[in-house]
Image (cartoon, coloured by chain):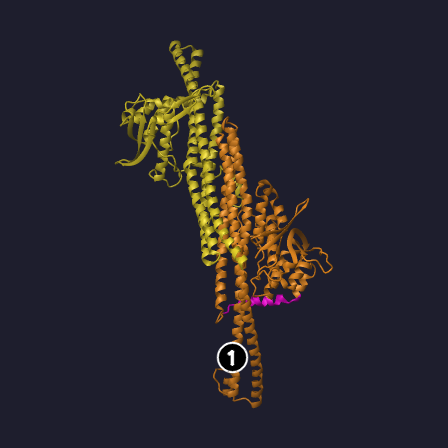
Chain colours: A orange, B yellow
Amino acid sequence: MHFGLLISIKFPQNILELTHVPLPFSNLKFINIFLFFIGFSGIHTVMRIKSAHIKQQLSRCVIREDGGGRTGRFGGSRLLRRMEICVSEAEKRSCRNAVSMLETFTVYLIETRPLEPTADGRNSSPDSVWRRYSEFELLRNYLIISYPYIVMPPLPEKRAEFVWHKLSADNMDPDFVERRRVGLENFLLRVASHSVLSNDKILHHFLTKEQGWKDLVHETGFQAKADSRLRALNAIFRVRSPNKHLMEVKHYSDELQSYTSQLLRARTRVADRLYAVYKVHGNYGRIFSEWSVIEKEMGDGLQSAGHHIDAYAASIDDILEEEEHYADQLKEYLFYAEALRAVCRKHELTQFELEMASQDLISKKQQREELATGIVRTFSFKGITNKIFGQEAPEQREARLNLLEELTSEGEEAVKEKTAECDEHAERAVTDILQFKEQKDKDLQEALISYALMQISMCKKGIQVWSNARECFLKM
Amino acid sequence: MSGHTVPADISDHMLDLDEDEDLEVYSKNTTLADGGTMPNSPGSMVNQYQLEEDEEDHQDVKTKDIFVCVDNPESHITAIETFITYRVVTKTSRSEFDSSEYEVHRRYQDFVWLRSRLEENYPTLIVHPLPEKFVMKGMVERFNDDFIETRRKALHRFLNKICEHPVLSYSQHFKAFLTAQDLGPYKKQGPGFLSRMGETMRAVAISVRGLRTKPEEFTVMQEYIDHFSTKICSVDKVTQRIIKEQKEYMDELKQYSPSYLQWAELEEELAEPLKGVGNCIERCSKETEDQIQHLSEVLLPTLHEYVLCADTLKAVMRRRDNIQAEYEVKNEALVSRRVEQEGLQEEVEDLAGRVEQANSALRGDWTLWRNVMRTDLKSAFVSAADRNVEYYEKCLAVWESFLLSQRGESVEQTDWEHGS
């Protein structure tokens, strides 16, 4: 699937608009990084000072689907086809919460703009809504309950994890907020371009209706379902004949979680060590500078070499900041693994409920048969009491038989419904899981390529710096 | 490494060298790159020296006519002790030598003897330092292979520095060291223990008294030496620290690559790129290992020798001061008391001459040393920078080849997509 890129970058003074740059990849994060590299790869200092600002501006870019895309998870009739969505800004707010305490939190601005002109031929004005993280969580929880067979796109992490020491674990830290903003935008884009999710009304309201959205969500009554589902999933239950395919998928999701978190931890430790290596080099600059004072011939060479080595030491900050994007891409799939597992678990639960209902039906049928034929096959309380107190009167027996008939047919209905639910869930889940896997392979391959690009950039910087230093040393 | 916790704010810690106990001791894990290759003929090597004070006008091109090689460490076990001897091979065209080739075996003690003789005879010349007697920290024994190799290389450099010195290379003791099968008789010569003790005590007394007037040039020199000493020590410390951090980085990389390879086994489509990245990281960690080795073998030993040189310089300055002080003491006595005039007069004249000689020797050697130091350090730094460039070039190649393999695949994919 090809995406075209409509980029609109707002700089403080002017607006640069490029239209339709076809790109062979579709992942938003990779696009961010790609633009970052091609646009600013030459200007190191600018990159360092303004990077946060520029990145914010860059992510105002939008993915718009080109015609003729393949129908898939992110194809077909999409919300995204009809409107641009982006999470453009973040702001701090304070207010008194339910227990009258002053709370500070960050809100994010969601801007949407319908792409097609309205009925009267004019372009609609953009909508903007401020949402905080907890509202995103609410939306996602609602979607999980409402579409339990969908592998739900994850939100960026609630608290900073896998932090290497120089990176802040503080939720209020501007870099963290920035990365969260990108993550939230990514979430919305994934949801809005999903074949099923994009049609959800609550999602629409989330994007357009700032006031009253929360009430709308709660009116759906999903919270009660969420609570009961949570209880049920936490209970230990055993499924007699689980869906083999989904069991395999669940096993896969467990391993995926384990391996990605292992990788993220290892990466953090490597980042820590690399930071140390670069920073210690910073001492050379200081010492060479002091040393050059006493040397006649060597002085200039030493000092200028020292300056280059200082630049080398300073370069690690940007390098590692870039790598955080890569880590975020991996984290997304760490959390996706959880979502995948949840779909499998939901099916297990449904299957279990079906088995329970079937059990119940069988027992009801047996009871009916016993009552009808008078032959007691199984042990029952009624059987015992009959023996002790004698058989009941024919009218009572009749009443009970009718009740059992009713319960049996209700039971049959229940089993039919549950079976349908189970099969439907399995079918939809399998479809979505397949598409999830395709997306995952594509996304992660791009992530790995972007990681390689980062390493290449780092090596090139290293070559440049040390070549320069070498030239200076030659002048000693 | 998994249990190792990084301190919360490492940046200050990074720059604060003095607190780190690591930095108090000299590094022991150094293996060196320069081997003991012998040139075939004395004339095949040319060395340039600036022997005159006036650097711009006179440049003497001196052909090197004596070559020494230290190799072949051998273990010797006697009833009393175990020690290592090194083979010392000399090739020379100098007329002072009866033959043009010599081979002897020397132990560390012999080198120490040689150096102390040279310092005695030429108190104000700068004699290159020897590697340390033994290492404090760590479990390195005297007979550890790496240690022996490091020492061998340092001894080789030591002798070659003597060879290159216009005055020291003509020392009788040096000749004896290179040629005599048995150094025993030579060791018995020279001032005895008591007279050496007396000298030391005199020197202490003089240094307590202080100098009357120290010539400006030597004050400047002393300041330079003090400053140089701190700087070279700091550079040495930083380099050691870098090596340490690089090693820890490399250890982490070794844990990092398996996590990609492990994950790859779980995946189908993704297995190849994951394996690719894992392999790249593995290769980069090997490159890091090589790079660390080079730092340890080339830059660090050079810096280290100049740390020791700084101490040598300080000792030379002290000796020069003592010579001057000795003269001043006697001169004062001569001027003030007028006791034993005749004998004293001669003595004072002698001492004055000695001062002059010491000063001019130092002056000349100082220029020589400054140049050699500059050359040595320049070459070491250039080599280190070169190696860094090479390291990054190799890593770049690794990642680019991965990218190429992936791009090739994605191009195929797009073609297929187009086709469908």
Of all chains, the one bearing label 1 is A
Instruction: Point out residue A457 in the picture as x, y percentages from the top left corner.
Output: 52, 44
Element under disc 1 = helix
- For the view shown, which residue lies furthest in the left direction? B79
Q: Is residue B44 left or right of residue A370?
A: left
* Residue beneath the point at 48% across and 63% down: A251
* Residue beneath the point at 66% across and 51% down: A91
Residue A2 quadrant: bottom right
A272, above or below A70, in the image: above
Q: In this view, does A181 lie to the left or right of B135?
A: right
In the depicted view, which residue is nearer to us: B385 or A135?
Answer: B385
Query: At label 1, which amino acid type do we have?
Result: Ile
- For the view shown, which residue lies furthest in the front direction? B419
Instruction: Point out residue A356 in the picture as x, y percentages from the top left corner.
Output: 52, 74
A462, above or below A337, in the image: above
Q: Name the residue under label 1.
A: A362
In the depicted view, which residue is nearer to us: B201 or A162?
Answer: A162
Instruction: Point out residue A198 in the picture as x, y percentages from the top left corner.
Output: 62, 62
State yes or no: residue B194 in magenta.
no
* Residue beneath the point at 42% across and 14% down: B352
Q: Can residue B2 be seen in this view?
A: no
In the depicted view, which residue is nearer to us: A467 or A409?
Answer: A467
- Marks counted in the figure total 1
Q: In this view, does B334 lie to the left or right of B418?
A: left
* Residue beneath the point at 58% across and 79% down: A410
Q: Is residue A114 left or right of residue B88?
A: right
State yes or no: residue A233 in magenta.
yes
Dominant secondary-structure state across the stretch colored magenta: helix
Q: Neighbour class for label 1 at 10 Å: few (<14), some, many (≥20)?
A: some
Instruction: Point out residue A374 in the picture as x, y percentages from the top left corner.
Output: 50, 88
Question: Which quarter of the image is occupied by the N terminus of chain A?
Answer: bottom right
Magenta residues (range) = A219-237
